[in-house]
Image (cartoon, grey):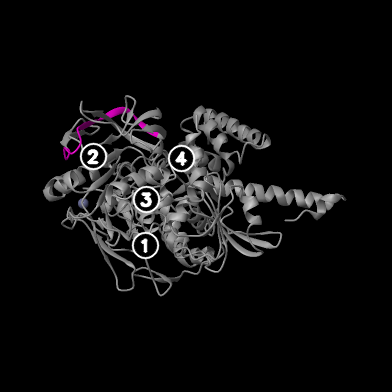
Amino acid sequence: MLGWRTRVAVRAGLVTAGLSRALGLGAGSMIGGRVTLALDAHALRRLAAGRRVVLVSGTNGKTTTSHLVAAAVRTAGRVAHNSGGSNMADGAVAALATAPDAEYAVLEVDELHLAAVAEALDPAVVVLLNLTRDQLDRASEVGATASTLGRALAHHPHTVVVANADDPMVVSAAKRAARSVWVAAGSSWLGDASSCPRCGHTLTFTTTEHGEPGHWECACGLARPTPDWWIEDGKACTAEMVLPLEIRLPGEVNRSNALMALAAACVLGVGPDQAAAALREVDVVAGRYAVVPRGAQQLRLLLAKNPAGWAGMLSMLDESRPLLVIINAREADGRDTSWLWDVPFERLTAPQVVASGERAADLGVRLSYAGLEHQTVADPLAALAALPAGEIDVVANYTAFHQFRRRLSRQSDHRRLDKEQPGPGTGVAG
Amino acid sequence: MSTESTITIGLLLPDVLGTYSDVGNATVLAQRLRWRGIPAEVRPITAAETPPTSYAVYLVGGGEDTAQQFAADWLRRHGQLRRALESTAVTLAVCAGLQILGRSMSDASGHHYPGLELLDITTAPGRRRAVGEVIATCAIPGVGSLTGFENHRGVTTLGPGSTPLGRVITGIGNGGGTEGVLTDRIIGTYLHGPVLARNPALADHILHQVTGQVLPPLELPDQAALRQTYLQRR
Ligand SMILES: [Zn+2]
């Protein structure tokens, strides 16, 4: 039973969310949650009371992984989930408030807010995917983030941390938890992780003959823990069982995300077979991986917001498809576009590339230095006109992705309206 | 140096300091040489090796606190490299790299540690982190306006004989109206972006020093638009 203060706060939050939606200010869950938190700082704690909570965090893959975990946990009961990706504390409040009867909560949490949210929720499971540089103008130091997380995890003796054994930053944080389950989830990019998060010395990495990330260690004693979960012959393995790991989402990175999700669901007590079967059904995650028809083009929408995300993205791109890359540098993207220079664009094999977005010029300069011929068209919809009919991969960073989706759906709404109303609008080329 | 020989750009400690896309500066220098028919290569120099001292250019990048202290210790241990930076090579030092080449730095807890003393500067933590776009007027003739993104807490004080790299128009830079340091062989700056991608004239100034040649101009698509975007701000 919620106290009256919390109830009033939640009501106010829901009303604000509706208002913000009505005013066209956005999905509403962010601003709604913010009002709730302001009115009752304990709302999060009280809303989560009595539920079993899974928090999913890390720099990359938290939206996808939280969708996979939620799908698996839904086989065991009702789930509150911030499926839209509002991943600050207020997004968590909004998700809990809109599903008061759910006995489980699966919450994607921004890595910088994880310590505070974990403090309030005392989660059953924390899934820690990876910690790399994302937005240095916001999270000034990855190492500091890892140690804050480590301190927070140490305060929760009942929390099981499902952690990526291949990410040294994650391991340095998760080692401080009372209970941890180590998953060999790989690391496609070690740009931030080559120096030891504990002492600053250079880590020693050894790669297996298959080129898989293998062991790593530091002179100070920090080393890769022995994994409890790993992938072998395309299956998810533990010492006790072998489970199918068949997923529809593309790319190696998503196989790793699925392995993390499966481990988390099993730790929570979900039946392993049901969990594995549920993962198979997930195909679109908050609009990502969706294929959107537009005129004679089919656009596959992908999101990558930092070098580590791009390193995983390169294995998902179809090398025969033209590529549209859209880059913004708003607050939520990070204002500094320097990260583009850590993306190995040199490896792109697309037959045609168009640079777009509010920072199209930054991207265009980067592509030139990568030796890639390209066109630069700042407006992404206009950029589509420069590309041929057929399948096109579209990769955008955070705000660019959401802007582009909104504009695509607004356009298709207009077209639908045009078709319904007799008039000259129907002939507009798509 | 003749056009026939390959110009090597040493990227110092990318495994320790490479947190702020400094590899981009190396990419820019190497490509601008290659596009003019001068062979160039980028050589990362990791902490595990004894650093080569014969390279034409060295880049020292940004890094986090622990990484910065480790890098300063490492550089001090390799005295022959210090001599190369002082007397034979051209060096670009960015952010933490700039601080490391100075006399001393202090961290947030007030702990002092020594730098390489190649630059007459000292750095102490400021009250607030300086984060955002910077525009400065460059002291090097012909380079014009500098644009870059700063992200640091250091306030850098220049010794009496030191020349700043530029005068700040917007942003913080060193603090006190100046940005970076300039000597015969070293350019120190707080600017990311990377700075040489945003300011090709600064890249060509370094390459002119290295090759001794007047290099033909390069026209890159998007470059003018990029500079216009950042230099028009505020
Ligand atoms: Zn260590």
Which amino acid is tagged 4?
Arg
- Which of pointers 3 and 4 indicates the residue nearer the eye? 3
Residue at the front extreme of this rendering: B214
N-term-proximal mark, 1 vs 4:
1
**Foreground: disc 1 or disc 4:** 4
Residue under disc 3 on the same chain as residue under disc 4: no
Q: Residue furthest right?
A: A422
State whether residue A164 is above or below residue A2. below
Q: Residue at x 68, y 36 (%)?
A: A22
Distance in Å between CA atoms under marks 1 and 3? 45 Å
Disc nearest the viewer among 2 and 1: 2
Which of these two is toward me, A152 or A52?
A: A152
Give the left or right position of residue A281, taking residue A315 as reference: right
User: Residue B50's quadrant in the figure?
Assistant: bottom left
Q: Which residue is mark 1?
A: A186
Give the answer, above or below, for where A409 lies relative to A4: below
- Label for residue B184? 2
| Residue where numbered disc 3 is placed | B215
Q: For the point 30% across and 59% down, which residue is it?
A: B3
Q: CA distance from mark 2 to mark 4?
A: 33 Å
Structural distance between the alpha carbons of marks 2 and 1: 46 Å
Between the C-alphas of marks 1 and 4, the distance is 29 Å
For mark 3, give the secondary structure: loop
